[in-house]
Image (spheres, rainbow, N blue to C red):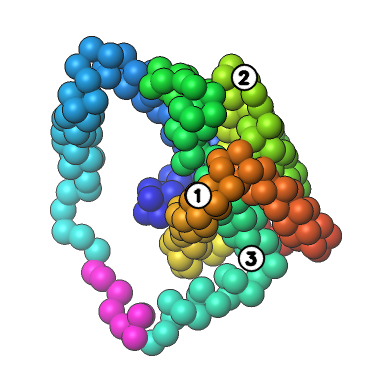
Amino acid sequence: MPSFQSIVPSIVEHDQIASGLALNATQFNLSRVLGPAIAGVLMAIVGAVGCFALNAASYLPFSWVALWILPRGKPPPAIVGSFAEGSLWHDIRDILRTPDPRGALLTVLLTSTLCGPLIVFCPVLVKTMLHGDVSGFSVAIAAFGVGGLVGSIGLLGIDAGRDRRRISSWFAQYHGPTLVLAALNPWFWGLPAVLALAGVAMTVSNTSANTLLQTTSLPGPRGQTVSLYMLAMRGGVSVGSLLTGLSVSLLGVRDALLINGLLAVAAQFAVGHRWIDRPEQVPARN
């Protein structure tokens, strides 16, 4: 994923990075819509095992295309000795010491840690609290993808000069209340609506943070910057799901999500207030 994300700035003009990343988010969220819909149909026809088998088989043409588009010829010489000289850790320290990248990474980390468990524990919410089945779960997850798709398409209409800090922080702050709504919602069909809002908030916030990171990063440490972004996003969900799982076992899924949502609102407000009050960093050029 860091390699894939880092490709975008190398194949588009600098002022098109935001649109390129928004298009990338569009195709990702489109798969979130189509995947659960197709899976729901397949599970009804061939069962869970058959669904997973067909999913595995679907990677074969993808792998063939990936091999087909690899550049031919002799690869460029590798850079030797950069890790031993400590340049990697120097780049990471520089990234984390710079206010805008640090604010973007912290925003993504808080969103993933506190709000990401909403999707992880959605099956528990659907089955035990709302008495839904596998079809209902597919609808709920597809709604989250629809929200993400709407958010990523909306980003395509935002001018490249807009302050991405404010966009990322504002939508991160809006994400917390979606967990509160999901925890308090008593109706099954209210959950897809809430998840659609959560999809909009997460996609717009994370993609805006990613755009800021990649437009303000120099080409050299861009790979490290994107790797830190992916670590904050994926690692935050892992840690947050573990901690939320403990609270779910003690308090129940509704109370656990309610606490996460309230913490997310308070934390994102504090981080956003400190982050966006600073002067905006001048974007780097390729």
Q: Nearer the viewer, residue 245 or 190?
A: 245
Q: Residue at x 59, y 24 (%)?
A: 191
Quickly name the residue at label 2. 187
Which amino acid, by three-letter code, is at mark 2? Trp
Which label is found at residue 249? Answer: 1
Q: Give me the residue at 63% from left, 32% from top.
A: 182
Q: Residue 149 in the image: state x and y as whole percent.
A: 54, 27
Q: Which residue lies most toward the front here?
A: 250
* Proximity of marks 2 and 3: CB atoms separated by less than 8 Å: no
Q: Residue at x 80, y 62 (%)?
A: 274
Q: Which residue is mark 3?
A: 102
Classify mark 3: helix, strand or loop: helix
Label 1 crowd (10 A; few <14 / some 14-19 / many >=20)? few
Depth check: give the residue in front, 1 or 12.
1
Residue at position x 23%, y 12% in the image: 45
Q: What is the span of residues highlighted in magenta in the rendered image?
A: 77-84
